[in-house]
């Protein structure tokens, strides 16, 4: 059996986990980052133990 790792949602801009989602209507789900203000449908789902630099900006 494989060991399951916990998944966390991260902002694609600042890699913060301080994210909340807003479901507007049936299909439009938007994520919002409280750290950098990002708003969008794209979000990163990462293993909790593999992302070592959560404050590093993605370029």
Image (cartoon, rainbow, N blue to C red):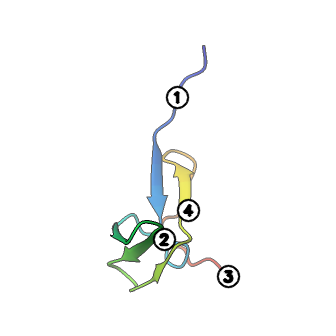
Numbered label attached to residue 44: 4
| Residue closest to the far top | 1
Q: Earlier in the sequence, mark 3 or mark 2?
A: 2
Q: Residues within 10 Å of mark 2 (few under 14, many from 20)?
A: many
Is the residue 57 above or below the residue 52 in the image? below
Which one is in front in this view, the residue at disc 3 or the one at disc 2? 2
Is 5 in front, or is 55?
Answer: 5
Q: Residues within 10 Å of mark 1 (few under 14, many from 20)?
A: few
Looking at the rendered image, the quarter that the C terminus falls into is bottom right
| Cα–Cα gap, marks 2 and 1 | 22 Å
Looking at the rendered image, the quarter that the N terminus falls into is top right
Q: Secondary structure at mark 1?
A: loop
Q: Can the viewer see residue 1 in this picture?
A: yes
Q: Mark 3 — residue?
A: 59
Where residue 52 sits: x, y (%)? 54, 56
Q: Mark 2 — residue?
A: 11
Name the residue at 42% across, 72% down: 31
Q: Earlier in the sequence, mark 3 or mark 4?
A: 4
Is the residue 56 above or below the residue 45 in the image? below
Report whether 44 appears left or right of 23. Answer: right
| Cα–Cα gap, marks 4 and 2 | 6 Å
């Amino acid at each position: 059996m494989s060991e399951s790792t916990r998944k966390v949602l991260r902002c694609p801009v600042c890699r913060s986990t301080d994210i909340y989602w807003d479901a507007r209507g049936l299909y439009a789900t938007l994520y919002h980052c409280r750290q950098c203000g990002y708003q969008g449908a794209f979000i990163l789902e990462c293993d909790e133990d593999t992302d070592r630099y959560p404050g590093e900006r993605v370029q």
